[in-house]
Structure formats: structure tokens, C-alpha cells
Amino acid sequence: MKKQFVKILSLCVLSAATIFVSCNKDDDDENPEVKIAKRVYILNEGSMSANNSSLDAYYPDSVTLCVKKVFAAANGQGIGDTGQDLIAYGNRLYVSVFGSNYLAKLDLNGKIVEKHEFTADEGQPRYLAAKDGFIYVSTYSDAVLKFDTTSIAASLGKVEVGSNPEGIAVAGNNLIVCNSQKNYVSDNRISVIDLTTFTLKKNVETAYGNFQSVAVVNDSVYITYYTPTYAIEMLNFDVESGAVKPSGAATKMVSLNGKLYCANVATVYDADWNSTTNTNFFVRDVKAGTDTEILDLSKTPELKTATVYLFEIDPDNGDFYVGTTDYVTNGVIYRFDKDGKLIVKFETSGVNPNSAVFVK
């Protein structure tokens, strides 16, 4: 894609002492134009029913430059309530907004190209996946909907799966669907959709349930789920046989170059419901079956007990992006290089940063 001139709405200034980018909405007096191709779009989920989701653009080649609330600037209005997921596909961004109940196709400046508002029958949108010119959306109508990227005005149909499906991912010619729970009853089924026919291939019953996210590493599929005590653990799922086996614990998973990168936020409670959190980051060599700690936290000891809401890797250079939340104040993004050394950290424009995508 050709480089574009982008009007900078806010300038992030790096403090050498703290390696912290401070994004101030009043820093746009001169409105400089900067020619930088690569961007990292960050979706801030916001707080449920607070109507405060937002989209930020960070420019990694400049290290210190970010633009806040690009969606609002491009469209003259905010995203709405609970921005759930964000993906980049075919030179477009796609964002699902759970509370405000729509799917939007955006250009690479964050402007709405087309929008689909979900009906009551279609349910509220959750997570996104894409393949061969189609977008797939899990919804709280116990189904997955299919959209043609040429127009998302109407869906091409839906496949009923299980209770309140969450994360979805493409594995070969299958779509793996994480069914979660409804009315506090966990669904113990993992659904597999045949993408050629867009029909349900099978619902695999397991001894587990309340599944949350899925990552595909070559031929291996990993799925996270809630335990009865609401810890989040991980399973290895064999798509063909339907077999599942415990595979450690992770709360966030990213697949890259045949390896599985994980963040694990382990929170335990005592008898008085006081919590203790221990957070670690590791990479799994799927073939060797070994885990290795990653990220040097010597300059960011706060991450050892932080709640990680976003964990992504830049596929171009292997840089790690870690987003944290306290569910009340604006999130913080930490950028590490491929060797785990801290490059920079900066505050986002909203609460609960949950997704980051890389475009250029």
C-alpha cells in the first residue's frame, strides 16, 4: 500500500527518564503532517453501557507518535458501546461493537465504509475471523454469521452452534467456535463449521466448558476455557478426532511462525475474596512441547501483577504489544522488541484496550 499523509490529531511525547508516551488531546495546535506508512490500530473496549469505546493509531516507526480517537475524528462520532473485536483484512478494518450492536467496515484512516446493524434474530456481535473474502462473526444468537467483504449490508446466512459463542478462528477449511455459557450454565461443546458449505460439521462434547478464545498454530488448535473457579486454562484440540487434553494455563494467546505466544494472568482469592495476581509471558514451541519465558520485566515490574487485556505480536518484526487494564482508567500499552526488551509504553484514549492490528 502506498504511504499516506495523515493529519496528526495528537502528538505523543517521549520522556527519556520513564520511556513513557504521554498522549494529550491538546497537543494538536500545529496539526503537523507526518508521512509514516505503518500503523498499529488499538481498539479500546470501554466500559459496558458507558458508550466510551475508542480507536487509537500508534506509529511504530516513529516510536513516540500516536493519534487518539481516530474513529471519532474520521466519522464525527464515537464508536459506541463496547467495541468487542478488531481485525485487518483486505486493506480494510472490521470492528464488531457488542453494546451498540453493529459491524463496521472501515478504511485505513478509521472512516466507516459500510455498516451492518444486527437484528434481534441475528444477536449481538462478538468476535471476528476472515478467509477467502468472507468475514465471520460469532453472535449471542448462538450462531455464527457470514458476510461478503464486497458488502456487509446483509449477511449471507448463519450457522447455529452452541451457547453464546465467543472466540472463533480458521483452521484449514474449518472454523473453530468457542461456545461459552448461558444463564450461568456452561456449554461443554466446541463447534466446527465447514467453510466450504458453511454448515455445522460437528459439535464436539468435552469434559470442559465455557470456552473463550482459540489460536491455531499450524495443525495445532489451542482453546482457553473457564474452570469452575473461574481460572482460565488451556486445551489442545484435535479437530479431526475431537480429542482435547489439558495444556497448561494462558489467558491470552497469539500464534506466529509455528509458535504459540501466551500471557497468563493467574488470580487467586482467599477466603475473604482478597485477590493475588501473578502474570507471566511465555512462548510454546509446539513441536518440541517446551515453554520458555519471554519479556524482560526489569523496567516494568508492575506487569508481574497486572491484568493483561491485550497481547499481540507485530508479524513484521516480532515486537510484542501488551495492554493492561484496571477496568476504570485509560489502558496502558507496553511495546517490547522481539528479544523482550522494553521499547516504549503509552496510555490509550480509553478503558480496556483489547485488540491491536498492524497495517501499512
Image (tube, grey):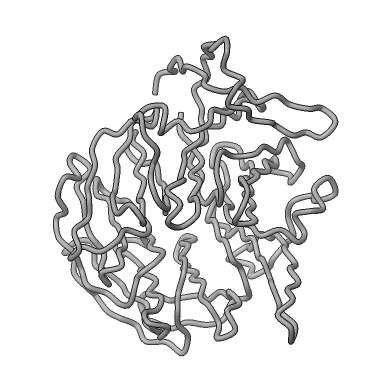
Q: Residue furthest front?
A: 50
Q: Quadrant of residue 133?
A: top left
Q: Residue at x 50, y 50 (%)?
A: 46
The N terminus is located in which quarter? top left
Provide residue 285's location: percent of width, then percent of height. Answer: 63, 62
Provide residue 232's location: percent of width, then percent of height. Answer: 58, 74
Q: Is residue 99 above or below residue 266?
A: above
Q: Residue at x 75, y 61 (%)?
A: 305
The front one of 70 and 288 is 70
Q: Residue furthest bottom?
A: 207
Provide residue 58's location: percent of width, then percent of height. Answer: 56, 32
Q: Is residue 137 left or right of residue 110?
A: left
Q: Quadrant of residue 227?
A: bottom right
Q: Residue at x 82, y 53 (%)?
A: 301
Q: Is residue 111 left or right of residue 277?
A: left
Q: Is residue 310 left or right of residue 268?
A: left
Q: Quadrant of residue 16?
A: top right
Provide residue 207's location: percent of width, then percent of height. Answer: 46, 90
Q: Residue at x 40, y 86 (%)?
A: 185
Q: Is residue 107 above or below residue 160?
A: above
The front one of 39 and 268 is 268
The front one of 69 and 77 is 77
Task: Please tell me how many numbered marks the rendered image carries.
Answer: 0
